[in-house]
Amino acid sequence: MFKNGEGGDSPQGVVHRRLGDMLVASGLVSRVAIDYALQKQVVEGQKLGRMLVELGFLSAKDLARHLAIHRGLEFREVPPVNPEVTAAFNRNLCVTHNFLPVGREGDKIRVLLGDAEPETVAALVQRRVGQDVLFWQGDFFAVTDAIHQHFYFKENPTEKLIESEVRRLSDDRDHAYSPERLMELILHTAVRERATDVHIAPTAHSRTVLMRIDGVLRPMFAMPASMDRLVAFIKLKADMDASEQRLPQDGSFAVSLMDALYTIRVSTLISEFGERMALRLLPERSDLDRLQDLGFLEEDVAEMERSFARPHGLILITGPTGSGKSTTLHAALRVQPLVERNVLTVEDPVEHRVPVACQTEVNRRAGYDFASAMRHFLRHDPDIILVGEVRDAETARAALDAASTGHLVLSTLHVGGIFGVVPRLRLLGVDAETVAENLVAVINQRLVRRVCPHCRTGRPATDEERAWLGVEDTPTLFHGVGCPSCRGSGYRGRLPVYEVLTVHRELADAIMAEAPRAKLRELAEAGGLKPMSRLARHRVLAGETTLEEIRRAIGWD
């Protein structure tokens, strides 16, 4: 058996040790995590870098940035792809070597690299098209996804195919033809559009397919009412009762979309015109961005990491549905030395994979909810407990009990703002003294759409905008005019607008004394709390988002 799984003195083992040493020296990964990954690698045979990412010890972006520095290349996100350049290549070739030709600069081909060796790809491109290569370094997983998406949609023009499928199903009076192909085309389109949800909404004479993209529902196309057979097919696929059309139902199924596994969560509602269906797309991958990559500022990340390094206590993330609470919670979990901690989670559902943690899912039919999970967790000597949501009195008391007995508890809470946390916990039956002793930090966040970098343009601020921004001069504000990359919306991606409250001694004393909300805010701001509105102004002035988007997600105040 190889020592620590390092592959003995083979050339491959030497390469892995060298990469591991570089990652440890850069502070990205601990030596314990490297040794753990090398041990698993002997059994599973994957490359060390990918193994570290899949185990959650390293983000794919961090690995790619480190590799870019090592290779002397610039790290880049996936840019728009020129189809004339990719015409000389095919999906299998690009996937095998993990590279994507994206454009042409003069007489050279610009290539986005994954984990391929630059020399190998340069020689391959030279043989293929007889041109030299300029490289950018990309995120391994993002490059793979981009390859699959580019070639899939090049070979399958989904808009035309969906139109053809709808016509075929409408003409199929005997129901001899399955709606499965239509479902697959809709789901592939959702992946391309970066949609989190697909909705099939009935009206009096038609059915509309909508997709939630960057937090906003966008209508994609309409179908005749006869396409209710698509809804029935999806219900069967999700192990739901297709004949039941009087009561709401929930189900799920697994599907592979462009070589990536997804769990599709399905839910139905009964409306005046028939069943409305919502499908949530959950990718089955463990890679997750760091807090910085999600858009949190460095100084706030440092403060958050200090809170998450505490040995015990309760940390809550607040905000409305769809504000990114679960994503932030799991990104913060990656701050921990996971291989050295016993991490237990109970979620509804599991949306992000953390391979080193033991993740469980609520099953109310079997009597397994958040509160019962907490009771069982304490028998397994956990260091960290992640509870998907504190939503009832029993869960609130169990979370605070765990925090007070030496465990770090992470969870979310549906309240309007930071200073609604204590009243909400009090309403759930937790006394002020217990809250004061155990509440470590609260992160309150919203998500706003990011201005598309490919069609970003500026204009002078109006007097009303200057007044809201609190500036005397006339700044340039940016917005997207719409382009193929953002599908004409002017936005691409989202970033958080947030505030971070760390509970210091004076604030804890005020909570225990049941001080009014105004007093708590005064103490919090004296202790360094930066209101969400300040970051919102910063985002607008930096050209990251628009005032219209701030108004939509947060409000003017």
Image (spheres, rainbow, N blue to C red):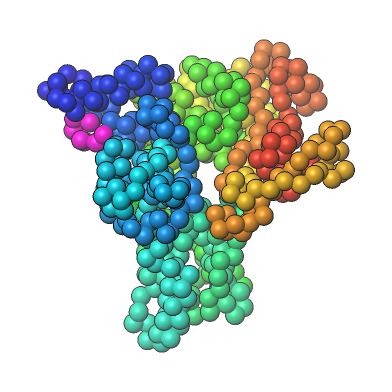
Which sits in the foreground, 225 or 376? Answer: 225
User: Residue placed at 44% from the left, 68% from the top?
Assistant: 158
Q: In the image, 480: left or right of 286?
A: right
Which sits in the foreground, 335 or 427? Answer: 335
| Residue 364 in view | no
* Rendered view: 402 above or below 137: above
The residue range painted magenta reads: 41-47
> What is the x, y in percent for residue 202?
57, 72
Asked if residue 44 lies in the magenta stretch, the reply is: yes
Choose top left, top right, bottom left or bottom right for residue 212: bottom right
* Rendered view: 549 above or below 187: above
> What is the x, y in percent for residue 5?
19, 24
User: Residue placed at 65% from the left, 48% from the top?
Assistant: 456
Q: In the image, 525: left or right of 48?
A: right
Quadrant of the image containing the N terminus: top left
Q: In the image, 329: left or right of 69?
A: right
> What is the x, y in percent for residue 86?
38, 56
Quadrant of the image containing the C terminus: top right
**Farthest residue, direction top:** 505
> What is the x, y in percent for residue 453?
59, 46
Which sits in the foreground, 5 or 476? Answer: 476
Asked if residue 65 lies in the magenta stretch, the reply is: no
Which sits in the foreground, 324 or 147? Answer: 147
User: Residue placed at 65% from the left, 27% from the top?
Assistant: 500
